[in-house]
Image (cartoon, rainbow, N blue to C red):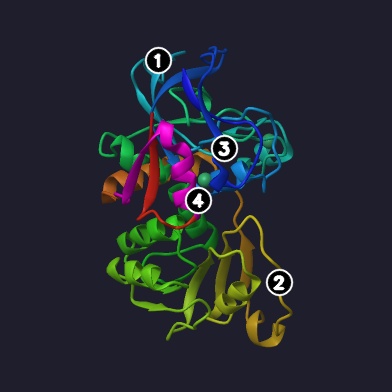
Amino acid sequence: MKAAILTSPQPVAQRPLRIAEVADPQLKPGHVLLRVRACGVCRTDVHIVEGELPPRQPGMIPGHQIVGEVVGGATEEIALGARVGVSWLGGTDGSCPYCQRGLENLCDAPTFTGYSIPGGYAELALARADFVFPLPAALDDLHAAPLLCAGIIGFRSLRVAGVEPGERVGLFGFGASAHLAIAVLRAWKCDVYVSTRGESHRKLATALGTAWVGSETEKPPVELDRAITFAPSGDVVIAALGSLRKGGVVAINAIHLDRVPQFDYDRLLWGERQLRSVANMTRVDARDFLALAAQIGLRPKVTVFSLGHANEALIAVKNDAVDGAAVIVP
Ligand SMILES: [Zn+2]
Ligand SMILES: [Zn+2]
């Protein structure tokens, strides 16, 4: 099969992915073999390819937002020819204390698609049969792909923040996740307040029906019930905290923060305000979100790249040069 292979991590401008013919993945028990129909490009792929996430295996094939057609390993639940999605969480051990508690997003021994196991920048991919999600017909290949990481993780952030219908919700930072979260919040009749840097982001946020749009650390004009931060910045977390009503919640959707600055407990946290972090996703999040996305007709903006242009797709994502999400079609 044809695949995009990372031999050694380098800046994406140096085109570190080699497009080459490699052996087809061999079907293993408990897995399905997929013909890749589309694979979304996530900012995490840039971090992997550039080595900010330490390499787990040489010759890795990135890509963790896979829309595939089952061509091998069909089961009673997943028929041959079925269209399924694969996300970042490629598998869990099912036995650690977190899996046992139903918190598989916190599993002690997870596998990650396109990072610890080969991903979807390829013509074929292997996935654990119990970690693929049947895709509703309403979601076509191109528009389903970006939902499989950015969409699911954004949705989980809303859950972690405890968002209730009709509430006032602040989004601090504006990327693919926030963009998709706005559509969910609007469907829940929430008023959305967006603080973000960049004129183009503010324009797009306004066009999506938000109640208010301001700059990066600007305070919304009302007290918020919930806030989600997407920027890897502690200052942004403090700005979000300063916007909350008593009893409100800030959910931090960032795998890394630069630091958490000292802040005034009496004014910012007292009054049962809460700070929470968001880590990974569960299969329940994925299934619930995909059903909701089909129901509300969620269609992200996409730009298509061929597999041969996988390096160009990464460069475009890194430079924020893509209007919406980038999707590779092999
Ligand atoms: Zn586990
Ligand atoms: Zn991702």
Which residue is labeled 3 in the image?
Answer: 89
- Of the numbered discs 4 and 3, the one sitting upstream in the chain is 3
Question: Measuring 51% from the left and 36% from the top, which residue is drawn there?
Answer: 63
Residue type at tag 2 = Val
In magenta segment, residue 280 = no
Label 4: few (<14), some (14–19) or many (≥20) C-alpha neighbours in 10 Å: many
- Of the numbered discs 4 and 1, the one sitting upstream in the chain is 1
User: Image quadrant for the C terminus?
Assistant: top left
Q: CA distance from mark 2 to mark 3?
A: 28 Å
Q: CA distance from mark 4 to mark 1?
A: 28 Å
Q: Position of residue 119 (x, y in %)?
A: 53, 30
Q: Residue 231 sits in which quadrant?
A: bottom right
Q: Which of the pair 162/282 is nearer the observer?
A: 282
Q: CA distance from mark 2 to mark 4?
A: 22 Å
Disc 4: residue Cβ within 8 A of ligand 2's nearest atom: yes
Which residue is labeled 1 in the image?
Answer: 71
State whether residue 293 is above or below residue 242: above
Which residue is labeled 4 in the image?
Answer: 153
Q: Position of residue 27 (x, y in %)?
A: 53, 12
Question: Measuring 61% from the left and 30% from the top, which residue is drawn there?
Answer: 60
User: Which of the two discs, 4 and 1, sits closer to the camera?
Assistant: 1
